[in-house]
Amino acid sequence: MGKYYDKLMQDYRLKEGLNACINCGTCTAICPAAEFYKYNPKNIVNIVQSKDEEAIEELLKSDAIWYCGECMSCVTRCPRKNAPGLVVMSLRRLSIETGLFTESEKGRQQYALAKVLTGNILDHGYCVHPATFKYESHPEYGTVGKWIEDNIDDVYERVGAVYNQDATGALRKIPKESMDDLHRIFEVTGANDLLDHIYTASKKKADEMGLTEEEYFHQVFNITGPEHLNNY
């Protein structure tokens, strides 16, 4: 077999999530993402099951594998207990490992997620942290949000949050031993390797597009085309 299918078959999620799919379409019928996006989990599973290397490569380059919300509704209704959501997880990982995720708009957005969301987790222990939630990147934050940002310590003290303090309660500073545990989890699970793939491939793509790192981040963070949604 070809390089993509063989690589996918090494992922336990694909082994557990693909059991002789009969292409009945039940997964697509129940899928919340398919209701809104141009997304068909049945077709994705069919392509993987076909072992067609060219078609699998196109999947790895596509927006389609990034529409899934991983709610696993598909598993609850599949007559063969397939898990298209797990198949999509495996495709996403391979797309990142090969760098092909930069070929689609939704794939390129993984750079923003890695830098902001994962960066917050590894630096602060929170998915969203006030220190990195900046008005310039979130104009919907409004002028009140800008005022909060400018007076952050005073504001959080007034509402009773122990912001960035060695204490218990909301927004406390996460202890070093807990942060060390987080970093070890990312290391032993291979998450750090995936982050390296994302940063390396994104830097290469930014260079190809003639963009600085900041310009590339702004583009993937803010720009979403209209072609992704179903038009009823």
Image: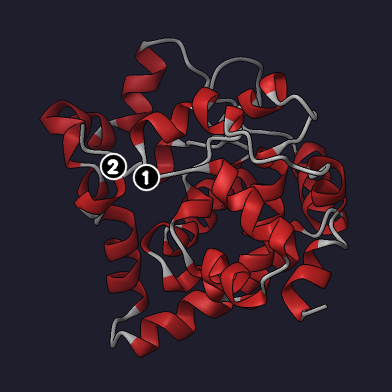
Disc marking residue 140? none
Between 138 and 200, which is closer to the camera in this rendering? 200
User: Could you tell me residue 53's position as x and y percent?
Assistant: 67, 75
Q: Residues within 10 Å of mark 1 (few under 14, many from 20)?
A: some
Q: Marks 1/2: CA distance? A: 6 Å
Image quarter of residue 197: bottom right
**Disc nearer the start of the sequence (1/2):** 1
Are the two marked residues, 1 and 2, in contact with CB atoms closer than 8 angstroms?
yes
Tell how many labels.
2
Residue at 49% from the left image edge and 43% from the top image edge: 40
Q: Which residue occupies 53% across, 40% down?
A: 68
Q: Identify the residue shown where x is 44% and y is 34%.
A: 34
Q: Horizontally, is 146 left or right of 121 in the view?
A: left
214, 42: nearer the viewer: 42
| Residue 147 vertical placement versus 124 (above, below) | above
Residue 92 on image: x %, y %:
62, 57
Indicate left or right for 227 with 6 as reference: left
**As shown in the figure, which amino acid type bears the numbered disc 2?**
Leu
Q: Residues within 10 Å of mark 2 (few under 14, many from 20)?
A: some
Specify the farthest residue to the left: 143
Q: Name the image quarter holding the N terminus.
A: bottom right
The residue that appears at 85% across and 61% down in the rendered structure is: 9
Q: In this figure, which colouring scheme has been used for the structure? A: secondary structure
Q: Is mark 2 on a helix, strand or loop?
A: loop
Residue 127 placement (x, y as % from top left):
55, 37
Q: Which amino acid does label 1 sit on?
A: Lys
Q: Can residue 179 be seen in this view?
A: yes
Question: Taking 168 as reference, is 181 above or below it?
Answer: below
Q: Which residue has dot 2 on it? A: 229
Tell me where residue 119 appears, x and y as whole percent. 56, 53
Residue 38: image tag: 1
